[in-house]
Image: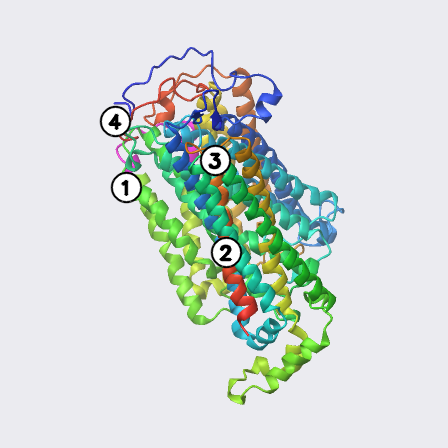
């Protein structure tokens, strides 16, 4: 039984959001959430490419231990710092934080709710341009003074370095503002624009995930905003709040920064978990196991996320008592996370699992994210963290979460919703090939980094002890495999756009609302506002 | 797309809402959520203030004695009055009295202007005395007063930090770092608020609002009250703490 009682299934293929209006200007000035999503998709994929190139350069530079052996003499330690910083800033602020909410949230949230648009369509377009302005500022630093602080802007270095820190923090501030406005829009949309009959316990789990994410965006991002403004004030006026010479305390910066940036980790991963809930249920052709538990665990993660920031500071001179407290609360995050994982696995149990490309990416997520999550629990224990702190173990851990988790879900999401977005299918063969390379390459790149970290190799160093060289070389080769895998995914997308076969309204046989309208959806999403009579995952 | 007034004098809600009141509720929820972000942003500053106030109380004590309580008090009264006139601006729009609404909104902008003018005199006076953030600070008398204050404190109240008077002298400008950052960010909000009030004033004058539809006036009003509220915390923390 479908989720919808009555929508006319007219797949005329004539009027849809892509051909509703024509011309570049109709795109740039659109307030249609679907078109804004596509503009975000193009921007974010472009930045992902740039951030990826920086990643390959960083890994390339680490292929050899000694500076004289490096593959390109242009890469001095200073240039290496810049590459590493740009990789971090682009991937965090410009790709992963906005990624899933801005692209899939924008495109799907209103459709999944049976709404015609988000609550504030013009604000939605404004946040896209605010995001672009921030991104332009960030990229602009490349042409002014560059940036070498890493994405964390830690004081005192960020106050002292001669690179263009003020411009970079203003860029992050601006993108944070876009993030706030998007989150605000989604919260109001979820509360106010649900279709008749769609109670909060009938909304798809992706919407729950985006909703929980939006709450974090609203509550955490302003604190990052003021922190970044204070960094600017520190550099321009020397106010002294973070500068010990003037009475301030750099550790306060770390507190402020992580009060945002740890919840920001959940801004990144919660939407990915939302995608996984959709994929697992659809491709197992089975009702999701534990809908309520998955939905509320998103809120639980959002709530706990505000109480764990101190685990970044176990060795920053924080009191032992605070350390123990933060350690225990951090481990609590494992509970709602495990609830989700077990529910996904229970959903697959005795389901009719189809291994199409999106599902492969979802299963990849289950493996990689579990490793990323569990190593997070290791790092949460104060004793082990003293050893692992600032080593490649931490790098491997958060890449297993950010890439193995978020980007796997993002790519899976692209292959899953591509037919809905463009009315065409991508080649499943190309999708699966890309998965094989991304999944294998990822493990080849980052698993050795766990070992390197346990052996004590510090992160962020340009030159390192030759004993670490073999594992670093394996890691670098892995990065090429990842790069190739994403290239294949890009080819699959382009091939789908150009020559993909026509997709029906519901090629995967899914039950959620977005598949009950034509592909691509009409300008107003549904010919008639649907009435929801059943839950989103009633397969049997 | 957004609300428009048709020729027969009625308002139409945007296409994705069911009714005007549906649209009103949604917009109001959005503004409230935005206010939450404002409070959290200033919250960071308040936390930093409280931390350093508790560690370096003498600096804040002496610092506040350099502020003009009279000017601060006048500004507090001015802002509270402006909140009242802002509320009147909403009220008259609800009662379909655009003329009175325009007067009330204009008075609000005047109050914002008075606030900024007084702030300007306070700022120039401080800058003249060299009482500015760290890099440009130049007022040895202030630093000496902090040292004198510490020397007159009962010995049992002295922490090791405070006993290091040379260090305390060096970091004394911290107070004015806080003063300028906190009031500066607030002043920026006052100016943005005044701009927004001007926007709804012009729309009111052009007959764009009425009892059926006054959402932007109310949204701007909420913003203005938050700006007022933040000052109500800033005033005692900076001026009266001594």
Disc 2 marks which residue?
B80
Task: Indicate the secondary structure of the residue bearing disc 1.
Answer: helix
**Is disc 3 on the same chain as disc 2?**
no
Disc 4 marks which residue?
A533
Q: Nearer the viewer, mark 4 or mark 2?
A: 2
**Is disc 1 on the same chain as disc 2?**
no
Q: Nearer the viewer, residue A357 or A180?
A: A180
Q: Nearer the viewer, mark 2 or mark 3?
A: 2
Q: Nearer the viewer, mark 4 or mark 1?
A: 4
Quadrant for the C terminus of chain A in the image: top left
Q: Position of residue A296 (x, y in %)?
A: 32, 45
Q: Earlier in the sequence, mark 1 or mark 3?
A: 1
Is-magenta flag for residue A301?
no
Which mark is on residue A410? 3
Above/below status of A106 relative to A402: above
Residue A439 seen in render = no
Q: Earlier in the sequence, mark 4 or mark 1?
A: 1
């Amino acid at each position: 039984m479908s989720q919808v009682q009555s929508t006319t299934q007219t797949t005329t293929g004539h009027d849809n959001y892509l051909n509703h209006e024509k011309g570049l200007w109709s795109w740039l000035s659109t307030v249609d959430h679907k078109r804004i999503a596509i503009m975000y998709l193009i921007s974010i994929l472009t930045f992902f490419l740039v951030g990826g190139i920086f990643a390959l350069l960083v890994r390339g530079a680490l292929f050899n231990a000694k500076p004289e052996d490096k593959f390109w003499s242009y890469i001095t330690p200073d240039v290496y710092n810049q590459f590493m910083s740009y990789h971090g800033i682009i991937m965090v602020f410009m790709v992963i934080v906005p990624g899933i909410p801005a692209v899939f949230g924008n495109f799907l949230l209103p459709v999944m709710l049976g709404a015609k648009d988000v609550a504030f369509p013009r604000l939605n377009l404004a946040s896209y341009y605010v995001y672009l302005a921030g991104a332009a500022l960030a990229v602009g630093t490349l042409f002014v003074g560059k940036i070498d602080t890493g994405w964390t802007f830690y004081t005192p270095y960020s106050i002292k370095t001669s690179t263009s820190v003020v411009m970079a923090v203003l860029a992050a501030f601006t993108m944070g503002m876009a993030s706030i406005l998007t989150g605000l829009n989604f919260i109001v949309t979820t509360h106010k624009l649900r279709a008749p009959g769609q109670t909060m316990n009938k909304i798809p789990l992706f919407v729950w995930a985006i909703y929980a994410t939006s709450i974090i965006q609203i509550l955490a991002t302003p604190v990052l905003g003021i922190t970044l403004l204070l960094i600017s004030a520190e550099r321009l006026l020397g106010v002294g709040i973070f500068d010990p010479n003037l009475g301030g305390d750099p550790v306060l910066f770390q507190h402020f920064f992580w009060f945002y940036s740890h919840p920001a980790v959940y801004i990144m991963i919660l939407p990915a978990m939302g995608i996984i809930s959709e994929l697992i249920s659809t491709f197992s052709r089975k009702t999701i196991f534990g809908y309520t538990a998955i939905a509320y665990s998103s809120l639980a993660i959002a709530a706990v996320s505000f109480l764990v920031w101190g685990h970044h500071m176990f060795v920053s001179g924080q009191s032992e008592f605070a350390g123990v407290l933060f350690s225990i609360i951090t481990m609590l995050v494992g509970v709602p996370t495990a609830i989700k994982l077990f529910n996904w696995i229970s959903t697959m149990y005795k389901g009719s699992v189809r291994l199409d490309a999106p599902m492969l990416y979802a299963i990849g997520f289950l493996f990689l994210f579990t490793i990323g999550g569990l190593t997070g629990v290791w790092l949460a224990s104060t004793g082990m963290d003293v050893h692992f702190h600032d080593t490649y173990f931490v790098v491997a851990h958060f890449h297993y979460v950010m890439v193995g988790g978020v980007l796997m879900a993002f790519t899976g999401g692209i292959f899953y919703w591509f037919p809905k977005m463009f009315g065409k299918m991508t080649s499943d063969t190309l999708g699966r090939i890309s998965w094989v390379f991304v999944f294998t390459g990822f493990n080849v790149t980052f698993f050795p980094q766990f070992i390197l970290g346990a052996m004590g190799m510090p992160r962020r160093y340009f030159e390192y002890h030759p004993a670490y060289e073999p594992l670093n070389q394996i890691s670098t080769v892995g990065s090429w495999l990842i790069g190739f895998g994403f290239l294949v995914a890009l080819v699959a997308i382009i091939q789908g756009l150009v020559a993909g076969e026509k997709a029906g309204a519901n090629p995967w046989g899914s039950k959620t609302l977005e598949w009950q309208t034509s592909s691509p959806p009409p300008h107003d999403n549904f010919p008639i506002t649907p009435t929801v009579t059943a839950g989103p995952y009633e397969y049997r | 797309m957004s609300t428009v007034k048709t020729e027969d004098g009625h308002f139409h809600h945007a296409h994705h809402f069911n009714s005007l009141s549906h649209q009103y509720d949604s917009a109001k929820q959005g503004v409230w959520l935005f206010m939450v972000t404002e409070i959290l942003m200033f919250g960071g500053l308040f936390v930093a203030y409280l931390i350093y106030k508790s560690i370096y109380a003498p600096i804040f004590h002496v610092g506040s004695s350099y502020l003009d309580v009279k000017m601060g008090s006048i500004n507090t009264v001015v802002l509270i009055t402006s909140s009242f006139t802002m509320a009147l601006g909403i009220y008259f729009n609800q009662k379909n009295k655009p003329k009175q609404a325009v007067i009330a909104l204009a008075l609000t902008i005047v109050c914002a202007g008075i606030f900024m003018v007084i702030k300007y005199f306070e700022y120039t006076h401080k800058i003249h005395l060299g009482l500015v953030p760290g890099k440009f600070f130049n007022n040895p008398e202030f630093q000496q007063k902090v040292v004198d204050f510490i020397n007159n404190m009962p010995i049992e109240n002295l922490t090791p930090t405070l006993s290091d008077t040379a260090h305390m002298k060096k970091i004394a400008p911290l107070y004015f770092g806080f003063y300028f950052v906190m009031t500066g960010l607030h002043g920026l909000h006052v100016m943005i608020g005044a701009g927004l009030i001007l926007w709804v004033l012009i729309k009111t004058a052009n007959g764009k609002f009425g009892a059926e539809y006054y959402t932007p006036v109310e949204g701007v009003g909420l913003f203005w009250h938050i700006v007022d509220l933040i000052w109500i915390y800033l005033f005692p923390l900076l001026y009266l703490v001594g």
